Image (tube, grey):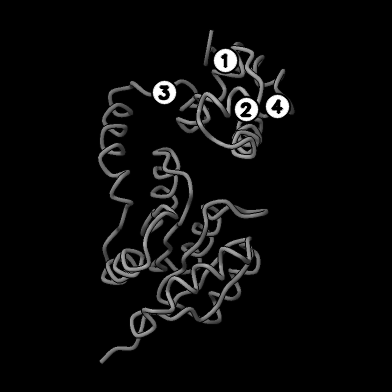
Amino acid sequence: MPGPLRIVLVDDHEMVRHGLKAMLAPFRTRVQVVGEAEGADDAVPLVTGLDPDIVLSDVRLNGASGLDLCRRLREERAERRVVLLSVYDDEQYLFQAMRAGAAGYLIKRITGEDLVRHLELVHAGETVIDPGMAGRAVASAARLHSGEFWPGARHGLTHRESEVLSLIVSGLSNRAIATRLTVGDETVKSHLRSIYRKLAVNDRAGAVAAALREGIFQ
């Protein structure tokens, strides 16, 4: 009988890595965590040395992202199986993950049983997507194909980042944006940092100017 799947975890939060190991522990006959890393630079040599069946990485990492890590690992070995785990159920992240060559995109609310089942499907050669995102992703892909998409998509903004940018243009504060979108202040700040980076600006005023200049919002 084949042994358990050998998994390397990549997440810049030690607590998250401990949580994932605890979640997978009851399934030790099916999966085994053989290594863990905080970021892409640590993960690449670790994965090269251990040669796991699957790399399970967060999308957001300090430094290079999980998307960058996926690309680097697949450039090194095209058949490398990388599954991205995220708190963001935004279709644009999913599309970016698929373009990077990921074998899966799952949301962190997943249960241990479902995570193990999806990892086994990936090892069998399938591509897995969070079930809650699959239908929305198909609809979004159809709109993208027809030229209809959310404002800012052509600049790399996710749907939620586009929403945040529209509220910035409307003059709302971070707290007001958090209340409107029913998210935490830190989540808003995270979206702002991503928006600034993608629009090549340094602050809210620059983001508003770029949105108006590029015709993202009028």
- The residue identified by callout 1 is 214
Q: Amino acid at mark 3?
A: Trp
Say what secondary structure mark 2 lies in: helix
Work out how far the residue at label 2 is from the one at label 3, CA to CA, in angstroms: 16 Å
**Which amino acid type is shown beneath numbered disc 1?**
Glu
Task: Point out the residue furthest to the right here.
Answer: 202
Say whether disc 2 or disc 3 marks the residue closer to the N-terminus.
Answer: 3
What residue lies at 48% left-to-right and 78% top-to-bottom? 33
Q: Label for residue 150?
A: 3
Q: Does the CB distance between marks 1 and 2 fall below 8 Å? A: yes
Residue behind mark 2: 199
Instruction: Indicate whether 67 appears above or below 135.
Output: below
181 relative to 1 in the view: left or right: right
Label 3: how many residues lie within 10 Å, few (<14), some (14-19) or many (20+)? some
Q: Disc 4 residue type?
A: Val
- The residue that appears at 43% across and 38% down in the rendered structure is 92
Is the residue 38 above or below the residue 104 in the image? below
**Distance from Cα at disc 1 to Cα at disc 2:** 10 Å
